[in-house]
Image (cartoon, rainbow, N blue to C red):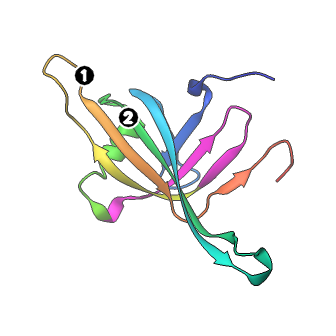
Amino acid sequence: MSFEKNYVYKFEIGESEEDLLTIAGGITNHDPETDEDSEGIYYYDGNGGSETVYNGFSLAYNFTGHRKYGDEAQEFIRDRAFDLSKRDCYFRVTEPDGRILEGPATIGGVKVSGGDANTRPDFECVISFNGLPTDTNPDSGV
């Protein structure tokens, strides 16, 4: 058993599954964020206690770092910053153990500059899967 560093993760974005660019240049941090919709249901045989039922789930990845001009993935994201009709994309996350999350996604929260005069410009974006991503585990064949 080993503990891998975060830089072993691979993030890719593109127009389609066949046309992916690696998100890495200038990126200093990624932060996955989940949002679960749940409700408590009370049954008589639960003696007054509730059973939690999950009705929905969403997954987004927040990226922060510095604006690296000329980086293909950052330029792909930047080109969509002010055109809401071009925010749809394909997104793939490969985890250190080879597990892959992928599927249609949407780009949001794009920040292409900012910071002090003597620092590198900020870069931020959020990539949210549209629906549940496909979750492929290479060890299980699923």
Task: Answer yes or no: is residue 25 visible.
Answer: no
Query: Between 17 and 51, which is closer to the camera in this rendering?
Result: 51
> Which SS class for mark 2?
strand
- Percent position (x, y) of residue 72? 40, 36
Residue drawn at 19 percent across, 33 percent down: 114
The residue labelled by disc 1 is: 120
> What amino acid does circle 2 point to?
Thr
Residue drawn at 72 percent across, 42 percent down: 99
> Which SS class for mark 1?
loop
Residue drawn at 37 percent across, 59 percent down: 87
Query: Between 18 and 98, which is closer to the camera in this rendering?
Result: 98
Residue drawn at 33 percent across, 39 percent down: 124
Q: Quadrant of residue 125?
A: top left
**Horizontal placement of 32 versus 26: left or right?**
right
In the rendered image, the residue lying farthest to the top is: 118
Task: Answer yes or no: is residue 92 visible.
Answer: yes
| Magenta residue span | 85-102
Vertical placement of residue 49 versus 125, above or below: below
**Horizontal placement of 136 versus 71: left or right?**
right
Structural crowding at the residue carrying mark 2, measured as other residues with C-alpha within 10 Å and reported as few (<14), some (14–19) or many (≥20): some
- Percent position (x, y) of residue 90? 52, 54
In the rendered image, the residue lying farthest to the bottom is: 44
Vertical placement of residue 45 versus 125, above or below: below
In the rendered image, the residue lying farthest to the front is: 47
Q: Is residue 86 magenta?
A: yes
N-terminal-most mark, 1 or 2 = 2
**Horizontal placement of 64 versus 92: left or right?**
left
Q: Quadrant of residue 115?
A: top left
In the rendered image, the residue lying farthest to the right is: 140
For residue 64, the mark is: 2
Q: Which quarter of the figure is the C terminus placed in?
A: bottom right
